[in-house]
Image (cartoon, rainbow, N blue to C red):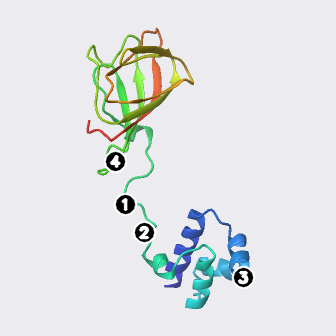
Amino acid sequence: MADDVGARLRALRTLRGVSQRELAKRCGVTHSSLSLIEQGKVSPSVSSLKKILDAIPMSVGDFFTMDLESRNQVFYSADELADVGTGDVIYKLVGANRASRALAFMIETYPPDADTGREMIAHQGEEAGVVLEGQIEITIGAETRLLSVGEAYYFDTNVPHRFRNPGDAPCRLVSCATPARTF
């Protein structure tokens, strides 16, 4: 039980961005006592735990019922990013395996002369992105603009749009769209 309380307390304190010394100062417990609790070497009394949690602040009930473990994958290596692109365009989707994804976050690569197709695309939601390498021509409705490195966009995706790389070098950009689409 002491190990669980200590590990939970350390995780909560870290999550809240509070140092051991700061938390000890806030709640009036010595730094060494707090350290021993977090290491699982000392089991705090209910009143001591309440005193510590009041300084965070959090109730004892919430402390024991909070979920500190992520049930979804959080980190992805480059080879775990699913390519959901079509044709020459590469869309590396972050979190493709998350069932309840609320957004589509992608690293997009457009080789020279590649585009999203002759037909304009439209769907519900919003999209934003920034160019990392090369240039991309984006048409949104009747407006067209050539974006270079560091330039960005943000638009309502119900407006018909198209992406095209008219340059001689590949274009890479990062984008985020809501709601998440099924690819």
Q: Amino acid at mark 4?
A: Arg
Q: Dot 3 corresponds to which residue?
A: 28
Residues under numbered marks 4 and 2 in contact, where contact means CB atoms less than 8 Å apart: no
Instruction: Please state which of the two labelled residues, at mark 3 or mark 2, is closer to the viewer.
Output: 3
**Position in image of residue 97 (x %, y %):** 31, 47
Q: Amino acid at mark 3?
A: Gly
Mark 3–mark 2 Cα distance, whole angstroms, equals 27 Å
Mark 4–mark 2 Cα distance, whole angstroms, equals 19 Å
Instruction: Please state which of the two labelled residues, at mark 3 or mark 1, is closer to the viewer.
Output: 3
The residue drawn where x is 56% and y is 63% is 15
Q: Earlier in the sequence, mark 4 or mark 2?
A: 2
The residue drawn where x is 34% and y is 16% is 115
> What element does badge 3 sit on?
loop
Q: Earlier in the sequence, mark 3 or mark 1?
A: 3
> What element does badge 1 sit on?
loop
> What element does badge 4 sit on?
loop
How packed is label 4: few (under 14 Cα within 10 Å), some, or many (20 or more)? some
Residues under numbered marks 2 and 1 in contact, where contact means CB atoms less than 8 Å apart: yes
Q: Earlier in the sequence, mark 3 or mark 2?
A: 3
Q: Amino acid at mark 2?
A: Asp
The residue drawn where x is 29% and y is 51% is 99
Q: Amino acid at mark 1?
A: Arg
Q: Earlier in the sequence, mark 1 or mark 4?
A: 1
Q: Dot 1 corresponds to which residue?
A: 71
Q: Dot 2 corresponds to which residue?
A: 67
> What element does badge 2 sit on?
loop
How packed is label 2: few (under 14 Cα within 10 Å), some, or many (20 or more)? few
Residues under numbered marks 3 and 2 in contact, where contact means CB atoms less than 8 Å apart: no
Q: Dot 4 corresponds to which residue?
A: 101
Residue 70's place in the image compared with 120, above or below, is below
Which image quarter is the C terminus in?
top left
